[in-house]
Image (tube, rainbow, N blue to C red):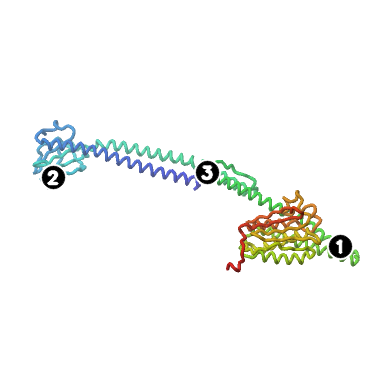
Amino acid sequence: MSLRARLTLVATGVVAVVVVLASVTTYFVMRHELQAQLNGSLKNEVAAVQRDPGAYSGPEDFGGNAVEILDQNGNVRAFSYTVRPDTKVLAVAAGVSSGFFRDITARDQAGQTFHLRELVVPLFGGAVIAYKNLQEINRPLERLQIILILVSLGAIGLAAIAGALVTGAALAPVRRLTAAAERIAETGDPSERVPEGGRDELGRLGASFNTMLASLEESLETQRRFVADASHELRTPLTSLQTNIDVLRGDVELAPEQRRMLLDDLHRESQEMRALIGGLLELARGGAQIEKEEFQLDELVEDALERARTRFPEVSWQIDGLEPTVVDGYPDRMERAVWNLLENAGKWSGDGGSVEVSLEAGEFRVRDHGPGFAEEDRPLVFDRFYRSAAARAMPGAGLGLAIVREVAEAHGGTVAAENAGDGGAVVRLSLDGAARSGSAANES
């Protein structure tokens, strides 16, 4: 059963219950009112006889109700309508029981059956009985019953129609979402959008669905661009490797110096390939779910600085302050990001250059004295595979700073690049809430 049918059924059921309860309540209230009026009429009739029993002489004196007067032995003294008294009536006439109301069935001399409302009350020296035909209230009640049944059926039918229309209109956005999801599943194209409209829950659902589609489209486009860029970047070193290998395997005799140069090229290109593949793997696992752990960022920076001094011995590495800092995150990825920043600064500093490093208030800062960032390059330096015109003459694939940004975002932080006022570049890796001052060993 569809959701629309279920909602319509529920709405119709609720209305049916309410209408039936209202109809039943109306019926019983009306019956009670009519019966109260009938009882009041009988009480008035009996009260008149009790005030002046001798005034009753026959049917013509009491035209409103049928009356019967019994003596204490149960003999009929006067009547306008007589019904054979039973033991309950005789007990009232004998003064043994009190009066009562009841419904009885009687027959006249022609054998016709009547349903009567009877009131029996004691009378000095006997009892007086007043009767009234129940048909006077049964007929209105029967008509009311038919009217209530027809009204209930009509209300339930209208509720079913209205429920179908309302649920159809309310579920229209859901149907559009379903149709869009089915088309996207069939075509694999997430560029489609659904009309949002309205500020209710379904409108917000449509907006959320479109946001999800936009994110999916962006993710697929990023993936396609990543694959295309990676293929392009890998093609150049692979082609160069293949060319050098073919030359080495060829029949042409090479001088030792030429062979050594080719082997050096192969080693350099293999190193570049290794770095490129490592960067690609780092970016590819950027969204992987890895359990976080606490680590000392200041110790990680010190280790990376020792490595940088070995890698760039001609550069002067200066520490402007390493504040003990605990980070809740991914130490392996953070180590890669820190090394990328140091390697980038060392690469651009050149022989005799200097790099200042600091770690304060959860911000890792690297400042070199190289050429700095060109203004047209600065907004793009953290993009994947982006290389400025000056960087194309140097080894690398344009992934180092892109990895830094990925790692910063994975820790809930940010990264920024700027030029120093007196020359050189400054890169800031801010971890915001992921870092705190102190030592993990002291905390434990």
Q: Secondary structure at mark 3?
A: loop
Q: Are marks 1 and 2 in contact (CB under 8 Å)?
A: no
Find residue 419 and report its horizontal and vertical position in percent: 74, 53
**Gap in angstroms between the C-alphas marked 1 and 2:** 135 Å
Q: Residues within 10 Å of mark 1 (few under 14, many from 20)?
A: some
Q: Which residue is mark 3?
A: 200
Tag 3–tag 2 contact (CB < 8 Å): no
Q: Residue at x 76, y 67 (%)?
A: 310
Q: Nearer the viewer, residue 201 or 63?
A: 201
Q: Residues within 10 Å of mark 3 (few under 14, many from 20)?
A: few
- Answer left or right for 394 relative to 6: right
Q: Which is in the foreground here, disc 1 or disc 2?
A: 1
Q: Nearer the viewer, residue 64 or 87?
A: 64
Percent across and percent down for residue 106 are 19, 40
Q: Cα distance, mark 3 to mark 1?
A: 70 Å
Q: Give the foreground label among 3 and 2.
A: 3
Q: Nearer the viewer, mark 3 or mark 1?
A: 3
Q: Nearer the viewer, residue 255 or 107?
A: 255
Residue 60 falls left or right of residue 275: left
Earlier-in-chain disc, 3 versus 2: 2
Disc nearer the start of the sequence (1/2): 2
Label 1: element kind: helix
- Looking at numbered disc 3 in the image, what kind of residue is underneath it? Asp
Disc assigned to residue 92 = 2
Q: Quadrant of the C terminus?
A: bottom right
201 displayed left or right of 359? left
Considering only order in the chain, which callout, 1 or 3, is on the residue closer to the N terminus? 3
